[in-house]
Image: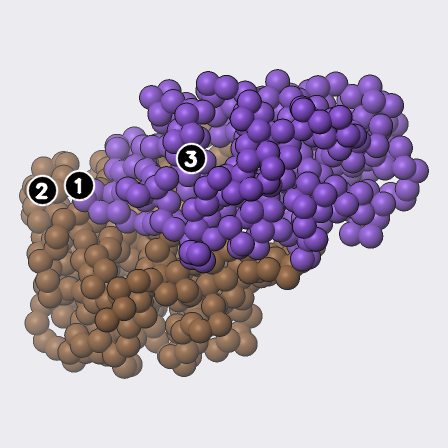
Chain colours: A purple, B brown
Amino acid sequence: MNTHPIPMVEVHRGPLAESLHSGHAVLCDASGDVIQAWGNPDQIILPRSSAKMIQALPLVASGAADARSLTSAQLALACASHEGAPLHADAVTAWLADLGLTDDDLRCGAEPSRDKDLRFEMIREGRKPCQVHNNCSGKHAGFLTLNQHLGAGSEYVEPEHAVQLAVRDAFETVTDATSPGYGIDGCSAPNFATTMHGMARAMAFFASAGGRGDGLSKAAARLTEAMIANPEHVAGQGRACTLLMRAAKEPVAIKTGAEGYFIAILPNRGQGLALKITDGTTRASNCAIAALLVRLGVLDAGHPDVKSFLNPEIRNWRGLLTGDIRPAPSFP
Amino acid sequence: MNTHPIPMVEVHRGPLAESLHSGHAVLCDASGDVIQAWGNPDQIILPRSSAKMIQALPLVASGAADARSLTSAQLALACASHEGAPLHADAVTAWLADLGLTDDDLRCGAEPSRDKDLRFEMIREGRKPCQVHNNCSGKHAGFLTLNQHLGAGSEYVEPEHAVQLAVRDAFETVTDATSPGYGIDGCSAPNFATTMHGMARAMAFFASAGGRGDGLSKAAARLTEAMIANPEHVAGQGRACTLLMRAAKEPVAIKTGAEGYFIAILPNRGQGLALKITDGTTRASNCAIAALLVRLGVLDAGHPDVKSFLNPEIRNWRGLLTGDIRPAPSFP
């Protein structure tokens, strides 16, 4: 078995492939078996924000989401790495208010909005970024909702806190493996490790959940539906997850993660896909996930939003075309 | 001979090496021979902004710099990827005025200042970025100075323009090889390709130039001295080139380039070093150049500014330590 990452993406400038990106990817079926692997399916990884729908499972499976009558858009926000645009920040602020909480109860940290208009407006007005602008604030609103339901303490991101123990339990169930450890994520929550195969298996669990009646599967099906129904809430204007979900020829939940991670959940096929770019760059993971989904027939290479990630132009400060990013010749 | 890039840098989070970066590096002596190579010395690359001191050679060798009485700081700016702080933008504006030219005569394109205070001030005041804020504006002021001396046309970045023909000639002389082609750089000038060995050979040409009397060698020695004497002009506050040059235990000119490139010129040893991170990431090229220069005894691993690139902490939005970047176990 191949244990090395394989070439996935090239960055061309003039006559040269100036930079190269390699990675691992696994496609699993509903039974958790590998349909196809690129690179090493046993590679241990941190799925980062690609695991957000797993981290949201206890919120739904516990009954906390229904007790608070969370909407489909709120469930999508719980799975989001949003850009902190007014759409997202205002929704999280309102959600916190419904819980009787404020920005101060979040533990994700303050992050400048990635929405340029809002960011510039806040700079002009001398306003500091808030925690609701953090790309993970929807996930944390979900954690706080679960936390109220459980009646546990305020430090809900600590690895031994009831919220995170519930997340770990769900994570190990859907990956069907004991997690070998965790890293602390950008938003201060633990991010559990698994193999590439484990993550693809978890995504296939989500993709096939609609056909099963257990609580975790019902939660997985609802979260998948919520992501597919609310692509703008999952990321935002011009972002890969949002645009690729909208461009898809069949229902698909697509979610990026830091350090070059990406997943896709394909409910019509009961299949799950996981991708890691070894060097952690987003330009490469955007291209490679698009290439994989084109190969699977989920995306059309000719769609302009697909091309903008599959084969984006590189333009310089004067707007001149200087190169492009493209899948490696042998991939996928 | 090894033709693959070798592991150079790891990004750790929790118990895992989450992301990995590979690359090529070559160290050459004054005769142009390889002292040591990591990865493939025959790999063809674009040196990007690491070639700026080569692109400035005709400015000095032609007599244009002396005809305009350019200072050592201006020669350093001609070799710079500066952050567009007031120090840099004001100096380029004054330089253009000395030539009877304005921002409009530049062809590098407008780029937002990378100096946060100035960038925020310009956003608050509704001012648009200018071409002098482009990190390459010093190089372009040098091109314009040479251009006036040559009496050629205004489009000095065109590959067949007299300025760029002079640059290509100098590039092929110091790399001691015919360039196999060029890409158009972020600043619209052609960036000539060579091998890793060719680039290290060129840097050894600069490092050993002080002992030779020909015009190109005298120009190379002056530019090297200018970079070493003015580290703040070469990059700026908190930037790797500036801080590592200042921290060095012996004179060294250090210059980054886009897409993971780096060079070092070691005049005391007559040696030149070239580095390319295959995936093009700056976090990895910063770490790898620091590791190489520690290994050569040029930098002290215990110096805080060296550690900030050799082994930087990764902190999250709440300021918690979540990981670190470090050289791969076998490197260098």
Pointer 1 residue = B157
Pointer 3 residue = A292
In front of the other: B159 or B282:
B282
Image depth: mark 3 or mark 1 in front: 3
Query: Chain ID for label 3?
Result: A
The type of residue carrying mark 3 is Leu
Q: Which element is circle 2 on? A: loop
In front of the other: A178 or B325:
A178
The type of residue carrying mark 1 is Val
Specify the label residue A181 is tagged with: none
- Say which residue appears at 33% left-offset and 62% top-offset: B5
Image depth: mark 2 or mark 3 in front: 3
Pointer 2 residue = B161
In front of the other: A186 or A38:
A38
Q: CA distance from mark 2 to mark 3?
A: 43 Å
Query: Chain ID for label 1?
Result: B
Q: Are marks 2 and 1 in contact (CB under 8 Å)?
A: yes
- Expressed as whole percent of the image width and height from the top left, the position of residue B93 reads 32, 43
Q: Quadrant of residue B314?
A: bottom right
Q: CA distance from mark 3 to mark 1?
A: 39 Å
The vertical placement of B256 against A299, above or below, is below
Dot 2: few (<14), some (14–19), or many (≥20) neighbours within 10 Å? some
The tally of labels here is: 3
Residue B61 showing in the rendered view: yes
